[in-house]
Image (cartoon, rainbow, N blue to C red):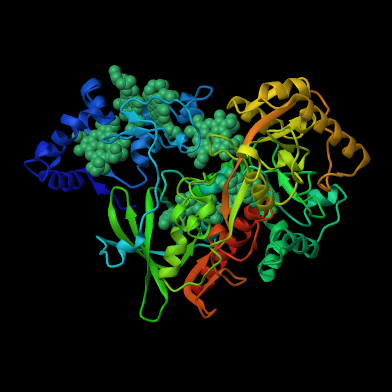
Amino acid sequence: MKSLTVSAAAAAVAAALAVCPVFAADSMNVVSAKAVYSQGAKSDYLAGRHMTATGADCVTCHTDNKVSDSQTEIDVNCQKCHGSYESLGKKISAHAGHLSINSCTTCHGGHEASFAYCNNCHVFDMNMKFGRQKIPYVPQDLGIYKDAVPNRTEAADLVIVGGGGAGMAAAIEGARLGMKVVLLEKMPIIGGSSLLSTGGMNVTGSAQQKAAGIKDSTETFIKDTLHVGKGKNDQSLLRVLGDHSSEALEWFEKLGGELKLDPGVYGGCSAARMHFTPTGGIGKYMVRYMKPALEKSGADVRLNSQVVRLEKDADGRVTGVLIKGKNTGLYRINARAVVLTTGSYANNGEIVSKYHPEFFGMVTSAQPGSHGDGIFLGKAAGAQVNHLERVQVHPNIASGTSLMITLAMRTNGGILVNNQGKRFFNDNAPRNELGAAMLKQPAQKVWLIYDDAVVAKRAKVHHGYETLGLVTEADSAEALAEKLGLPAKAFADTMKRYAGFVKNGKDEDFGRKELPEPLNQGKLYAIDVVPAIGGTLGGLRTDTSTRVLDEKGAPIPGLFAAGEVVGDWHGEDRYGGNAVTGNIVFGRMAAQQAKSLMK
Ligand SMILES: Cc1cc2nc3c(=O)[nH]c(=O)nc-3n(C[C@H](O)[C@H](O)[C@H](O)COP(=O)(O)OP(=O)(O)OC[C@H]3O[C@@H](n4cnc5c(N)ncnc54)[C@H](O)[C@@H]3O)c2cc1C
Ligand code: HEC
Ligand code: HEC
Ligand code: HEC
Ligand code: HEC
């Protein structure tokens, strides 16, 4: 991997600082870099502290005087003195997160302010030395790179843009097929929103379903997905998804993962087909196995590396990408094929509120870098972009955070009540309908209610919510109502009435079909929930072999896409559990397609 020499970068810094009177640097070498980095404001930061308090030199952190974009060589040095990320971890500590981090420099800056990456989603009081609590990640206008000139050019067979689930699947597959693969990720960690997936993976025709005696087929899967998506999905993509879903699960199992069948049935669907892990969220579990497989595959993974432009030749073929590396600047990689796996635009308020002014300022549960870069990159290269108005509102975000509470708490029995202690809708309705109903409740206050029988089915996840202080518990409905400030009698009546519906197998108030639990077993639990943007459904148009199509419906040579950047497969609402499956199915397929171009 190309990296910048410390002296060269220091020269650039010195040149930049020359206009700033405080840091007027005299010459362009390491000595002057030392002066710049260890004096004045720079000594307020971590590198300066190490240099004054421990006698560290530049090479103590920068082996060979190099600084790569991924900063991996710096992380290795931090860990030599301080130990690994896990070894530093306490209970709720920045060193005991669930993000599959092994990079110290995700949070600790050397010559800039440190910040706790955790607070992009949580609200922890993390006082970092030389730091601040949070830096916001905001969308960037990639249009400014239209005519930008790279400082160097590299070559690869396959470039993958975005290191979430779809990108990782594509990179592993591509490298295994013998291609020279470079995976570019703009954030300091890989995993994307995929790392946060909590529910599970939909598969039809799995060994797990067969063992449980559940009859299922691609046909019923398509029917159910169309039901959730209001018939607006591209059926040809769903057929590919259904037909390849059990193969995708087997592929993951070969990496070492083991998934169980969740008996819960997603609102209005006809079979249990979500596969999950009792150890917690599906996303972090998948990354736990995909990350080592990625490292072993030989793919070149670069962090802090944002793709800012697709390169095309005169014939319209995509020939590579322009990258903005955090430390090494703008460079180009020429490639035979490019796969866009950049995820959603859920954290791009400009796109979202253009179509939905009513969602202005709404939080999102997607990862902070979900800015829709792929939509912009694709569009600038002539791709067809559809239905950006399809934005998914998720009913289950813990109030005051951007934390999604898994829908499995509802599919497995939980209900929703408003501040009058009353149910107000079919609690297992598709997300968008439920989200809209929540917005209409008095003061928009809603609580998710469940009991120990539901906990027994998702114990690990529930205990996580407890650790975070999100859960209120009590021994009776009256006691819980008192703690939540709800009218006690109304709430107790609601619970009794609901238990009656479950006993008789019929929800007379809101027609909820699946009634797994009467909610009168052991303790009762409540989480204060609000709606938020869970993900986005619009995006690039692809054919059934992941080729990106232009305005006229013709494939753009050399360009592929997979994952949440692709539109049309989910229709108007996403069937929970389909995305994770699609990441593997379409991510791998994109790499296979790319390989077919190499002949
Ligand atoms: C809280 C939560 C829970 C969910 N639960 C489930 C579930 O249980 N089951 C399910 O099926 N789905 C679930 N989903 C949806 C699912 O996680 C996503 O749709 C899916 O993981 C998206 O995968 P992806 O690889 O396309 O995108 P991501 O995983 O978001 O990855 C995209 C990556 O591309 C990077 N990137 C973007 N632009 C650039 C650029 N210009 N250059 C370089 N890199 C770039 C991003 O930083 C990111 O890392 C959930 C989503 C959320 C937010
Ligand atoms: C305690 C470890 C540490 C020491 C000592 C250290 N650095 Fe760094 N350096 C970092 C980290 C971490 C980063 C990446 C994050 C950042 O830029 O703050 C970095 C980034 C850099 C970069 C690229 C980004 C930028 O700021 O331009 C340069 C150049 C650099 N260091 C030069 C130096 C020089 C010259 C010295 C010696 C005077 C030095 N560093 C000492 C940790 C260190
Ligand atoms: C050569 C060994 C060494 C390396 C390499 C090193 N450290 Fe340290 N670090 C130390 C020592 C020793 C201290 C205690 C210094 C002091 O008295 O404040 C320290 C202190 C710290 C502190 C606490 C500062 C304070 O004032 O309490 C942080 C945070 C830290 N290091 C993080 C890092 C990170 C992140 C890296 C990599 C970018 C890194 N260290 C690299 C040895 C090292
Ligand atoms: C997710 C963000 C994050 C990452 C990644 C991270 N740290 Fe920290 N670190 C913090 C925060 C926040 C603190 C302040 C104490 C706290 O709140 O836990 C801290 C404190 C420290 C301290 C001060 C002493 C202490 O234990 O409080 C040292 C030393 C340190 N980190 C080293 C490292 C090293 C080495 C790595 C990589 C193996 C690393 N950190 C990775 C966020 C992070
Ligand atoms: C991009 C958003 C995001 C970031 C960044 C993030 N979290 Fe979380 N965190 C979540 C979500 C969503 C959940 C609930 C779902 C789950 O358990 O995976 C969660 C759950 C948790 C839990 C309870 C469950 C468990 O696994 O123990 C803890 C503790 C936690 N996070 C700590 C951290 C720490 C520490 C960091 C920083 C290293 C961090 N989180 C960074 C989104 C995030």
Taking 266 as reference, is 117 above or below it?
A: above
Which residue is pictured at 72% across the width and 58% down the height?
Answer: 228
In this image, 304 relative to 544: left or right?
left
How many numbered marks does the figure carry? 0
Identify the image quadrant of residue 238.
bottom right
Can residue 296 be seen here?
Answer: no
* Image region (quadrant) for ligand 2: top left
User: Where residue 41 appears, x then y in whole percent?
Assistant: 19, 31
Instruction: Choose between 495 and 289: the one closer to the eye.
Output: 495
Q: Residue furthest left?
A: 26
Q: Residue at x 30, y 59 (%)?
A: 331
Question: Which residue occupies the foreground of this view, 581 or 398?
Answer: 398
User: Residue 87: where, in percent of width, then height?
Assistant: 48, 25
Residue at 62 percent across and 71 percent down: it is 544
In the image, taking residue 327 as reference, residue 576 lies left or right, namely right
Q: Residue at x 34, y 52 (%)?
A: 1
Q: Is residue 60 above or below residue 586?
A: above
Residue 78, visible in the rendered structure: yes
Q: Give coordinates of residue 345: x percent, y percent.
A: 49, 55
Q: Is residue 147 above or below residue 31?
A: below
Give the left or right position of residue 358, taking residue 60 as reference. Answer: right
Q: Is residue 236 left or right of residue 43?
A: right
Measured from the top left, where is residue 244 in percent x and y? 69, 62
